[in-house]
Amino acid sequence: MIVDCAIYQDGRRTEGPADFSDALDAARKSDDAFLWIGLHEPTEREFDLVRHEFGLHPLAVEDALRAHQRPKLEVYDDSLFAVLKPVVYESSSDTVSTDELMIFIGDSFVVTVRHGDSAPLADVRSRLEADPQILAHGPTAVLYAISDAVVDHYIDVAGELQVDLEELETEVFAPSGGDSSNTAASIYTFKRQVLEFRRATGPLTAPMTRLAGAGVPFVHQGAQPFFRDVADHLARVNEQVEGLDRLLSDILSAHLAQMGVRQNDDMRKISAWAAMAAVPTMVAGIYGMNFDHMPELHWTWTYPAVVLFMALAVFGLHRQFKRRGWL
C-alpha cells in the first residue's frame, strides 16, 4: 500500500502528477527535485509496478518484500539499498520488538518500505518538510534523517533497558532474594530482550561506517560528517548494549552463586538436625534390643538418667552447630 507520494523541489513539497510514473519523470526533469514514495507492507503485485518503474534490483526487491533481514547497505547499478531495524521497548511487559525499514535511493527518487508500525517515517517526513534547507540536499537527506531518527531511538531504548536492569539488579541482591526460580527466569528473559536489541544495533555499524566514508554512490559528498555523527551515536549504543549483556551475565552468575550458598546453608541445617536426632535414636535403639543381661534395666534411676543424657547430648550438639553458623 502506498502511504505517501510527493515531489520535493528545492526542499519544498510540490503538487505533482498522481501517477508515480509521471511524477518520477517530472522530478527528473529538474536538477533540484526528487520523488519520495512511502509504502507499508506492499504485496508482490503492488511492488512489481514500483520495481519496473524505478529499475530496482530483483534481489533487493525480494529482500524488501520478505523482510526478516539484517541491517545492511548494498549498492546496485541503479540504486542504493539500505535496511534498518527500528526498535520498540514495551516497559510494561519488558519486551523488545523490532520492525523493518527498507530504503531505496536512486536517480531523483527515494522509495521507503515499512514492515511493522514502529518505523518513524511519518515524523521524519514532517520534520524534513519543516526544514527545506536540509531536504534540499535530496535523497541523501532522507536517508540521513531516517538513520538518525532510528539510532536516536536506540539511545532511548538503551536508557530504558538500563533503568529496568538496575531494578532487576536490586531485586536479585535484595536480602530476601525473592523467588529463585522466578528471578532466574526474569534474568534470562531480560537477556533475550537485550539480544534482540543487539541484533538490530550491531549489524548496522558497518553500513553507517561505510556511509560516513567517501565514494558511496547516490550519496551526496557533503553528507559524510552527518553520517559520522550517526555512526558515533550508534557506537555509543553498541557500547551500552555490550555493557548490559555483560552485566546481565554477571548478575546471573551471582544469582546462581547465591542459590548455591542457600542450598549449602539448607544442607548444613538439615545435617545438623539429623545429627541431633541421631543421638537419642541411637540410645533408644540400644535399649530397644531386649537383651536379658542389661544391669541398668533394673536400676531405679536408669530411665531419668538416659533421658537426661540424651537431652544434654542434643543440647551440646545444638550449641556447637549454632556456634559454627549451621543453625
Image (cartoon, grey):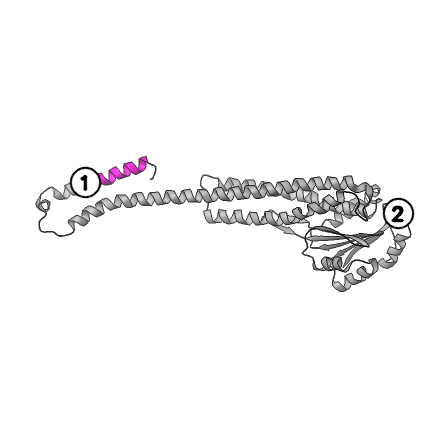
Q: Is residue 238 left or right of residue 25?
A: left
Q: Which mark is residue 309?
A: 1
Label 1: how many Cα within 10 Å (few below 14, some 14–19, many 20+): some
Residue at the location (22% across, 47% down)?
281
Span highlighted in magenta in the image: 309-326
Query: In the picture, which quadrant includes the N terminus?
Result: bottom right
Q: How many marks?
A: 2
Check whether the beta carbons of the residues at disc 1 and disc 2 lie within 8 A of each other. no
- Work out how far the residue at label 1 is from the one at label 2, CA to CA, in angstroms: 104 Å
Residue 83 percent coordinates (x, y): 72, 52
Residue carrying label 2:
32
Please tell me which residue lies in front, 181 or 59.
59
Whether the magenta-drawn stretch holds residue 209 is answered as no
Q: Of the residues shown, which amino acid type is indicated by label 2?
A: Asp
Query: In the picture, which quadrant includes the C terminus?
Result: top left
Q: Which mark is residue 87?
A: none
Residue sticking out furthest to the front: 215
Residue at the location (26% across, 45% down)?
277
Whether the magenta-drawn stretch holds residue 312 is answered as yes
